[in-house]
Image: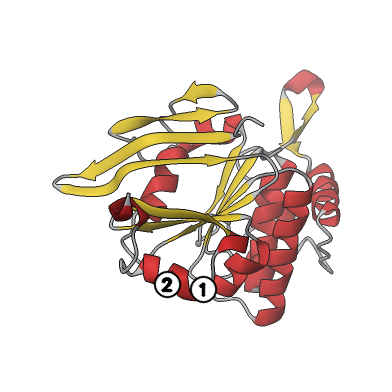
Amino acid sequence: MEPMLSIKNMVKRFGGLVAVNDVSLDVYPGEVVALLGDNGAGKSTLIKCVSGVYHADEGEVYFEGQLVRFSRPIEARRHGIETIYQDLALANNLDVGSNIFLGREVKKRYLGGLIRTLDNDFMLQQSQMALDSLGIHFPDLTQPIESLSGGQRQAVAIARAVYWDAKLMIMDEPTNNLGVPEQRKVLDTIRTLRERGVPIILISHTLPDIFAVSDRLIVMHRGRKVTEKKISETNTQEIVQYMVGALDDTREQ
C-alpha cells in the first residue's frame, strides 16, 4: 500500500532555531497516526509545513504519490488536506450551516445571474447530512456557533472537513478543554473516519486518547523524531520517557 502522505527529511528554521530537524514520516490510508511531544518539540511547526502555513527550508512532501508544494493553506485544502486547529477557525456569530460552507458559500441566481443570494436552505440541508453521516445530532442548526458547547463546535469543524471531502485530516488537540462525554464523542468520530479510510494525524498531550484511537505514534523532541512505534508495542510510561528526552532511538542507532 502506498502512503497517502509522505514527508521526507523536512527541516524548518526560524533564524538560528531549528524547529523541525530532518523529520521523515508516512501516513497510510485508514490509519490514525499520533504525533506526540512536549511543548516546543516541533509538532505544530511540522503540520503547518504540511498544510501550507509555513514553507519548509529543506525536504519534500508527497501527497497521493505526487510531490506537492503548498504556498497557502487553501492550496492544501484543495488537495484534500484539512487541518483542524485548537481555535477551530469558526465564525462565532454564524450558524452551523454557514460555518460548514464558510468561504465556499452556495448562492441562488436570479434574473440570469444578475441577482445572487445565499442559498441558506441548501447549506443547512447539506450540513445536516454531513452531521448525520458522523452520527452527530444537533437540536437546531440555525443557532449561532457561540451558543454551542466545545464538543459541538469541534463536531462542526470535523463535519466541515468531511463534507468537503477530506482525504487527510490533521487534528491539533481535538479533545482539549472538553468534558469527558464530549471527549468520547470526538474519539468516536475519529474511529468513524478511520473506518471510512480517512487517515488522521492526531496531535495530543492526552495519552489515554492516543492509546484509545491511534494505530501508530511518532514522538518528537526538540525538533527531531526520536521514535516511531505501533501502539501495541509500547505503553504510556515508555512514551513519556521519549517525550522528555530520556529515551531516543536515533541515539541508539
Horizontal and vertical percent position of residue 127: 79, 50
> Disc 2 designates what residue?
240
Q: Quadrant of residue 246 in the image?
A: bottom left
Inspect the image, locate mark 1, and give the three-letter code of the amino acid beneath it: Thr
Inspect the image, locate mark 2, and give the three-letter code of the amino acid beneath it: Val
In the picture, measured across the screen, residue 62 lies left or right of residue 53, that is right
In the picture, measured across the screen, residue 195 lies left or right of residue 154, that is right
Can see residue 178? Answer: yes
Q: Reply above or below: 196 against 117.
A: below
Point out the image quarter for the N terminus: top right
Looking at the image, which residue sits at the far front? 253
Q: Reply above or below: 52 against 93.
A: above
Disc 2 residue crowd, few under 14, some 14–19, many 20+, Cα 10 Å: some
Q: How many marks?
A: 2
Looking at the image, which residue sits at the far bottom? 180
Q: Nearer the viewer, residue 180 or 96?
A: 180
Q: Are marks 1 and 2 in contact (CB under 8 Å)?
A: yes
Horizontal and vertical percent position of residue 131: 80, 55
For the residues labelled 1 and 2, the Cα–Cα distance comes to 6 Å
Q: Which mark is residue 236?
A: 1
Q: Nearer the viewer, residue 55 or 121?
A: 55
Horizontal and vertical percent position of residue 195: 78, 50
Q: Nearer the viewer, residue 33 or 77?
A: 33
Residue at image location 80% in from the left, 22% down from the top? 111
Q: Reply above or below: 122 against 155.
A: above
